[in-house]
């Protein structure tokens, strides 16, 4: 596997999509930090580094989807994945080498976002309002979520040998998961009732009787299931971290680890039995 | 004779379709083994299975005597190179970088021999040109060069001259012959272009519906190939009853041509035809080609 990793890193470090993704994440964090600092200076608003520090968690999934499309996607169409097996490498090694490359990409992307945000944010905006310990756990949770994305994308890429499908599937998956995350957040945040207003003859608006909110998920299996998915899915975790609603980063980290292990195990088992063309 | 590849009752099914149906074959060391069969006969499936890309449903195979289910099969695979369907090359890399990448994948300590390899396949002057800008023939040659990294002594080539222009076909043919004769590399090759295959192969395997119909050496093929007389006459309708009268086996090719698989007295034949008002325009002796042998063996219902 050492040989595969060496060859893989040679390709990875020359992958434009990886560096553009890192640049994008660093740019987003830089712009976010600087704009909040300018607002603070111009309007005298008291602010902290927390506000935009986790913006990267919302887009890192997309960035990883783009990297997997260019890193693993062409391996089937170019026949190089077959080349590795023909010359005696084991399927397990080929799969794990690609998974590790994706994990390395995730780590690199996280560093690209976190380092400039810290380097600019700490001197310009000050420390974390949420506390350094919680900020650290949330950042590590974000990294775990990025690793879960990596496991998921590696599995889909390693099991998809159709070129067109391999080119779009990770992006579609990222999109669907993020939309699912936003939807789950909206349903879970929905209040039981909606406050309506009535207009009197004299033109005054007065509150009417609150009406039941159809989007509200009452306590029960449906709400428990939705909450479980909201905590489990990497797309939903992205939404939680980016909107700073992640109340239990440690629990989310556990879920992310479970997704990573599950996708890695399933992907590896299926890849070992897959007929390659 | 030492065997490089040996399959035993190899079977591969996709659902209810049997792509390989108890196929048994032997590829002798130092040979150029031509795999001949119609479309869908199982040639590519056989190569995929042998290369470890697919698992046989039943039966097995051995490379250099090591069974495919043995954990040591990886060691045997390191002694082989292959181009199955598409050449395994990174299109965003130059020829040289593709070979360097393969060297890394193989874990070779340095890049020695890389330039010689590029020269061998005629890509020594491609410089920084990306593989995506190569012609089909160049990509094919680069694929062979990648397969040759690590100095394998068994090469598996699936349709290596498909889609190439005449010049490309000649280049690949000469390359394969050079590898076989100068480097003693055993080659397993499939091709639809039977005439081209007959210029390369020292051994043949005729495969049909996933089964090995016949294996033979080029010498055996030559001996088995029937000689015939190609007779051109004014009317083959008159020729047929005459040949029937002689008890000769024949095949009518057109209104004026027929192949006769018998040694006939030309004077008697000419006289007999003249009596029926049929004119003999020419008679030539012909050897049966690989193509006609293939057609006779497997029938002409599909494409080779």
Image (cartoon, coloured by chain):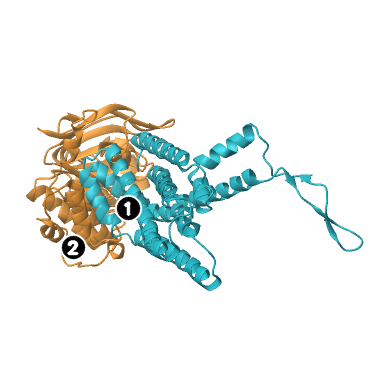
Residue furthest to the left = B182
Cα–Cα gap, marks 2 and 1: 19 Å
> Residue at label 1?
A78
The chain drawn in cyan is: A
> Residue at label 2?
B123
Image position of B266 (left or right of A40): left
The chain drawn in orange is: B
Residue closer to the observer: B234 or A243: A243
Residue closer to the observer: A28 or B142: A28
Residue A226 drawn at (x, y percent): 59, 39
Residue A225 drawn at (x, y percent): 58, 35
Viewer-nearest of discs 2 and 1: 1
Residue B295 drawn at (x, y percent): 31, 41
Q: Residues within 10 Å of mark 1 (few under 14, many from 20)?
A: some
| Above or below: residue A261 compared with residue A137 | above
- Quadrant of the rendering where the C terminus of chain A is positioned: top left
């Amino acid at each position: 596997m050492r040989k595969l990793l060496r060859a893989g890193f040679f390709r990875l470090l020359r992958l434009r999509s990886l560096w553009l993704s890192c640049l994008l994440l660093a740019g987003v964090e830089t712009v976010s930090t600087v704009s909040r600092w300018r607002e603070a200076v111009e309007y005298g608003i008291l602010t902290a580094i927390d506000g935009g520090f986790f913006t990267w968690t919302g887009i890192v999934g997309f960035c990883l989807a783009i990297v997997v499309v260019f890193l693993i996607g062409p391996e089937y169409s170019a026949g190089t994945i077959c080349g590795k097996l023909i010359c005696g490498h084991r399927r397990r090694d080929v799969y794990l080498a690609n998974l590790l490359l994706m994990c390395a990409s995730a780590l690199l992307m996280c560093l690209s976002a976190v380092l400039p945000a810290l380097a600019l944010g700490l001197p310009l905006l000050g420390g974390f309002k949420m506390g350094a310990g919680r900020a650290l756990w949330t950042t590590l949770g974000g990294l775990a979520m990025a690793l879960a994305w990596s496991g998921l994308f590696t599995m889909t890429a390693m099991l998809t040998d159709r070129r067109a499908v391999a080119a779009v599937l990770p992006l579609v998956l990222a999109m669907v998961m993020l939309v699912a995350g936003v939807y789950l957040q909206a349903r879970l945040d929905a209040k039981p009732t909606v406050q309506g207003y009535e207009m009197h003859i004299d033109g005054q608006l007065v509150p009417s009787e609150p009406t039941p909110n159809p989007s509200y998920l009452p306590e029960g299996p449906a709400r428990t299931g939705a909450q479980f998915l909201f905590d489990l899915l990497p797309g939903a975790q992205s939404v939680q971290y980016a909107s700073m609603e992640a109340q239990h980063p440690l629990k989310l980290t556990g879920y992310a680890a479970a997704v990573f292990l599950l996708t890695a195990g399933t992907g590896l088992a299926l890849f070992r039995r897959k007929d390659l063309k | 004779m030492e065997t490089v590849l040996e399959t035993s009752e190899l079977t591969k099914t996709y659902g209810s379709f049997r792509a390989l149906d108890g196929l048994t074959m032997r590829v002798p060391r130092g040979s150029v083994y031509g795999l001949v069969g119609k479309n869908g006969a199982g040639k590519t499936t056989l190569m995929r299975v042998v290369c470890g890309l697919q698992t046989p449903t039943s039966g097995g195979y051995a490379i250099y005597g090591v069974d495919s289910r043995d954990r040591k099969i990886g060691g045997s695979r390191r002694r082989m190179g292959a181009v199955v369907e598409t050449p395994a090359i990174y299109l965003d890399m130059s020829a040289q970088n593709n070979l360097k990448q393969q060297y890394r994948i193989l874990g070779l300590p340095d890049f020695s021999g890389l330039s010689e390899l590029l020269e061998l396949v005629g890509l020594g002057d491609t410089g920084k040109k990306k593989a995506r800008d190569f012609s089909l023939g160049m990509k094919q040659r680069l694929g062979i060069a990648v397969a040759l990294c690590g100095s394998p002594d068994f090469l598996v080539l699936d349709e290596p001259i498909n889609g190439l222009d005449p010049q490309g076909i000649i280049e690949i043919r000469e390359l394969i012959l050079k590898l076989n004769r100068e480097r003693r590399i055993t080659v397993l090759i499939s091709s639809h272009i039977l005439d081209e295959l007959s210029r390369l192969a020292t051994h043949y395997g005729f495969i049909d519906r996933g089964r090995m119909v016949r294996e033979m050496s080029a010498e055996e093929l030559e001996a088995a190939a029937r000689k015939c007389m190609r007779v051109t006459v004014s009317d083959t309708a008159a020729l047929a009853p005459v040949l029937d009268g002689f008890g000769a086996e024949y095949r009518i090719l057109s209104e004026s041509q027929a192949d006769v698989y018998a040694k006939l007295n030309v004077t008697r034949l000419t006289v007999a035809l003249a009596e029926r008002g049929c004119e003999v325009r020419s008679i030539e002796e012909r050897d049966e080609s690989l193509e006609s042998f293939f057609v006779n063996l497997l029938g002409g219902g599909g494409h080779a």
